[in-house]
Amino acid sequence: MLPAVEVDEHRAISIITKDTGNENAPCKATVTTPEGRTDFLPTKKVPGGYEAMFHPLKKGPHKIRVEIDNKEVPKSPIDVVVEDKLDIKKLQVKGLEKRKSLEPACCVCVINMIVMYVITCSFSVGFVLLF
């Protein structure tokens, strides 16, 4: 499954370099938009590596490419699907509208079992339960 981000969402990307032996190696991140335009994602130094901010403005497939010391990192480019924003006002939750009842056939079986039990008890003990 591809990572998904909403249009106009700000998503931080962490690039962890602390275990590479050169934590301060130069870092570069770019994004290729669905139109084929490549833009730089500004990176800033943070403890343990770098951070870049991904802020897509159009929906569709994007590719994020990350380089450390002018070498592309493994699994780069990363495919990301940018989706339309979720409209909370249109969200619906279904399945909890009413109490779930027993099926009619099951009720008949249970009632028949109770009646049979009552009849059996009445013959063996000598009384009848009415309900």
Image (cartoon, rainbow, N blue to C red):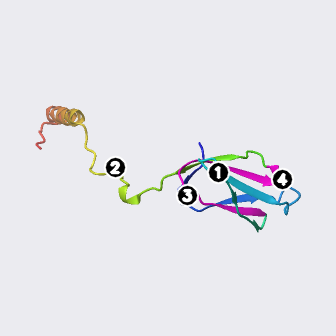
The reply to whether callout 2 and callout 3 are in contact (CB within 8 Å) is no
Residue at disc 3, secondary structure: loop
Where residue 3 sits: x, y (%)? 60, 48
Q: Which residue is tagged 2? A: 94
Q: Which residue is tagged 3? A: 57
Tell which tag, 1 or 4, sits nearer the viewer.
1
Closer to us: 71 or 128? 71
Where residue 81 sits: x, y (%)? 57, 48
How far apart are the two marked residues, 2 and 3, measured between alpha carbons? 32 Å
* Residue span colored magenta: 49-72
Which of pointers 3 and 1 lies earlier in the amino acid sequence? 1
State the residue at coordinates (77%, 57%): 28
Quarter of the figure with residue 48? bottom right
Q: Which residue is tagged 4? A: 70
Circle 2: residue type: Lys
Circle 3: residue type: Leu
Is 53 displayed left or right of 128 in the figure? Answer: right
Which of pointers 2 and 3 lies earlier in the amino acid sequence? 3
Circle 1: residue type: Arg
Mark 1 Cα shell of 10 Å, populated few (<14), some (14-19), many (≥20)? few
Circle 4: residue type: Asn
State the residue at coordinates (69%, 60%): 41
Where residue 85 sits: x, y (%)? 47, 56
Q: Which residue is tagged 1? A: 37
